[in-house]
Image: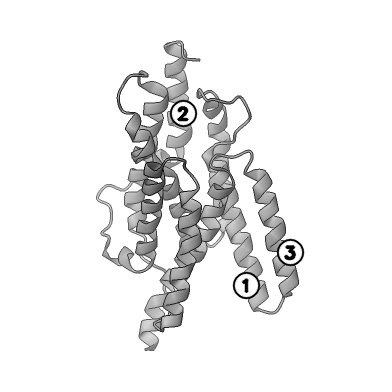
Amino acid sequence: MHQEQALRHARPVSHWTGWGQWLALLTMTIDHMSRHVLPADHGLEWTQVTLGRIAFPLFAAMVAWHGLFNTRDPMRYARRILIIGLAAQIPFMLMPRASDALLLNVCFTLSLGLMWGAWLRTLLARYRDDQLAPVALLLAVAGSTLAMFLAGQWVEYGLYGLMLIPLMMLALYQLHNAASDPGGRALALLSTLPVLFAAGQLNVSDVAKGFTVATCVLVLLLAAGAARRVPPVAWVMPRKLWLSWYPGHFALIAVWLWFVGGL
């Protein structure tokens, strides 16, 4: 019994994130190529509401997973993501878009979402240790939600994108540490519902919603134990490629658009 509990509470196997990195970069790049590089009549618009809708929930899931299980300092991890976002912001702003309003790229969404999730975990830990009154906890959660609502006006995917990471962190924790009793499993199952709801609000079309929600379902199943069955990735993504691809591919697209007169 003690051995079973130790295995359940041990850090989960993270091999799937190696595959997730390749899939996230591939689907994101396909989406951006379809939107910004290929001619208007290229016939691949379907990728924007299918493959392109996999990237963000996959990035968010990996950030939540690493922030929860694989880093001792989630805030430092969030700051590293923020640096990538700062490097990518200028080429990101050069991409054609319907509105001229300032919009911060998805790295800001991921970074702020992780900071929010890590801060909420700290508050819950203080509450469990009787260092924080229930009223203070509720006020802190309400105040931070209001702050994220305001921040959501400026970042990609808005408030629901910001919410996805702390909700995912909660669900991943509950699924990984689900007790063997029916009550524990029911709590773990209930924790997935807000994740799926938030994921469903990220897109407009039903097809896009389906791909986004399905991606989240897959990650939730990994947290519930399926991660143990995923083998290590055959070709590990070089760290420099992983860190530079997001700002780098936007810079290359911006150069291409300038060359063909699209800027």
Q: Name the residue located 60 percent from the left edge and 33 percent from the top edge.
A: 103
The percent position of residue 200, horizontal first and vertical second, equals 46, 50
Mark sitting on residue 139: 3
Query: Of 93 and 86, which appears nearest the observer?
Result: 93
Q: Is residue 19 above or below residue 48?
A: below
Q: Nearer the viewer, residue 41 or 113?
A: 41
Q: Are marks 3 and 2 in contact (CB under 8 Å)?
A: no
Query: In what element is the residue under mark 3?
Result: helix
> For mark 2, does the 10 Å Cα neighbourhood hold few (<14), some (14 to 19), or many (20 or more) residues?
many
**Mark 3 vs mark 1, CA separation in Å:** 16 Å
Using the numbered discs, state the Cα–Cα distance from disc 2 to disc 1 in whole angstroms. Answer: 40 Å
Tag 1 secondary structure = helix
**Left or right: 97 with respect to 5?**
right
Q: Residue at x 46, y 10 (%)?
A: 261
Q: Is residue 139 left or right of residue 99?
A: right
Residue 208 lies, in percent from the top left, at: 39, 42
Residue farthest along the front direction in this orientation: 206
Q: Amino acid at mark 2?
A: Phe
Residue flagged by tag 1: what amino acid is it?
Ala
Q: Residues within 10 Å of mark 3 (few under 14, many from 20)?
A: few
Expressed as whole percent of the image width and height from the top left, the position of residue 190 reads 47, 69
Q: Quadrant of residue 38?
A: top left
Is residue 21 visible in this depiction of the protein? yes
In front here: 143 or 62? 143
User: Mark 3: which amino acid?
Assistant: Leu
Residue, disc 1: 125
- Say few, some or many: other residues with alpha carbon within 10 Å of mark 1 (under 14 / 14 to 19 / 20 or more): few
Q: Which residue is mark 2?
A: 250
Q: Earlier in the sequence, mark 3 or mark 1?
A: 1
Q: Quadrant of the N terminus?
A: bottom left
Q: Residue at x 45, y 17 (%)?
A: 257
Distance of label 3 from label 2 (alpha carbons): 40 Å
